[in-house]
Structure formats: structure tokens, C-alpha cells
Image (cartoon, rainbow, N blue to C red):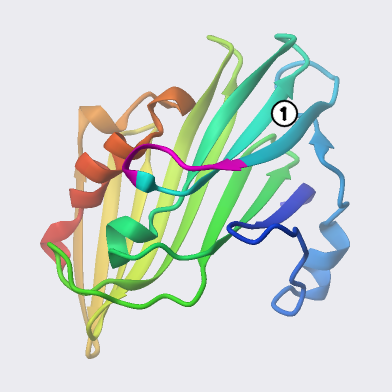
Amino acid sequence: MKTIFALLLLTICTQTFAQTTKWTKEQEDEITGDQSAKFDDDNLVDYFSTTHLNDEDNMLRNVLSINLSSLKSEIKINLLNNSILYNNKKSAYYTFCTINENKICQVVFDYMDQIAIPNISGEKKDLKEKLKFRFNPNNKKVQVIGYELSYKKGSKIVKKSFNFLTGKYIATCKNNGKTTNGSGWAKELQNIYVENWNVAFLRDKIFWYGEEVE
């Protein structure tokens, strides 16, 4: 599926730069470098920008702002730094945003220099996340449709995937050649919009789903 927009940011540093060493030639060809794309339900381009600040619980974050042409207004999406939840330590992180031809926006979070410190659920490190959202033409709101994360906990490699359209989640844990699977459904995992994507939702709800596989 073709990517028509891409933006790479490094949080905590004051500069913004592209890191191409991990990209394939195909990915490089897809990237336009523009900060605009068609995202909502009209045929006009929408404009993207980011700001950087601290919020509750001192969770450093970027905010992705999108000027929606159909609404003639700006919406803001929290790009939270979750390293505090999983490492009990603040880490710098990349946010790599892409929009495909189906107008699905994906943000990849890649944390740097992670140091695992035991917290309430044990050692967790090498955290990586993916967040997907889209414009819902029925209610004219930006809907979060998916979230994925992976991390290491001791010798275990844990992966979790959430589908916010169906309310289902899947969790897997690989440990010394053995794989443990878990899955489930919850009403609170359906109909998630950008205004619901905050520290409390991630810390008090998402964080605990899939714990059975660990």
C-alpha cells in the first residue's frame, strides 16, 4: 500500500532530521517530504505540523496538529512518550508519521537509549509502538483505529495489538522458544477518538491488557 506522506521527528532534540539507514529503497521512493496530504472526506489537502511540550505526570510528548479543510478547523493528537510507563525512565523517541492512499495515518514510535529499570510490572525495555487513526466521515471526528506495541521483559518478547473498531486485542509472549497467546474483547476498547487518547487511558487501561501472557 503506497505511502503518500511521511514525516520523521526526534523528540527532546531541537532539530528534526531523517534517518534513512534503516529504510528500504522502496520506502525511500514513497516518501514525498511534504507536510500536507488528503486526510478528511473532501478532495482538498490538509496540513500537518507538530509541537513539543510536557503534560500531566511529566510525560514528554509531541502533539500532531492537523488543519482539516472540510471542517475549517484544527485538531490535535497526543503523541505520548510512554517510556516512563514501561521503563520508569524518560527516553528520547522518534515519531515517524505516514499517510497511505486510503487516508489511514500511522505514527511509529521508536525509543532510543532505553535503560530497563524494574517497576510495578518488572523490567520492560526496547519499547516500540504504532498508532493508527483515520477521519470518520459520519461524525466528522478523528478516530483511533489501532495500536500495537512490543517490548522485552527479561528473556521474554511481548507483543500486543489492539483493534479499536472491533474492541479486540491480541497478545503474544515468546520465551526461550515457547509462545504464549492471549486475546479478548472489551467494550472500553471500542469507539476511541483522539480526545480519548491520553495518559489516563494508556496508563490505567491499555497498560494492563495482555498481562496474562507475561
Q: Where is residue 96 in the image (x, y as percent from the top left)?
A: 65, 55
Q: Which is nearer the eye, 84 or 149?
A: 84
Tell me which amino acid carries mark 1: Phe
SS under mark 1:
loop
- Looking at the image, which is closer to me, 197 or 90? 90
Residue 53 is a magenta residue: yes
**On screen, 157 above or below 182?**
below
Q: Residue at x 27, y 71 (%)?
A: 124
The segment highlighted magenta reads 52-57
Question: Does residue 169 lie above or below 214 as drawn?
Answer: above
Q: Mark 1 points at which residue?
A: 39
Asked where in the image residue 134 lies, by quadrant, the reply is: top right
Residue drawn at point x = 78 percent, y = 15 percent: 69
Q: Which residue is drawn at 28% across and 35% down?
A: 200
- Would residue 108 be found to the left or right of residue 50 on screen? left
Give the side of residue 60 with respect to residue 30, left or right. left
**Residue 172 locus on image (x, y percent):** 26, 66
| Residue 148 part of the magenta-drawn span | no
Report how many numbered discs are placed on residues in the image. Answer: 1
Where is residue 79? Give x, y as percent: 52, 43
The quarter of the image holding the C terminus is: bottom left
Local crowd size for mark 1, using a 10 Å CA cut-off: few (<14), some (14–19), many (≥20): many
Kindly indicate the quadrant of the structure image that contains residue 85.
bottom left
Which of the 4 image quadrants contains residue 185? top left
Determine whether 191 is above or below 155 in the image: above
Q: Is residue 148 left or right of residue 7?
A: left
Which residue: 17% across, 66% down?
119
Residue reaching furthest bottom? 176
x and y percentages locating residue 128 in the rendered image = 45, 64
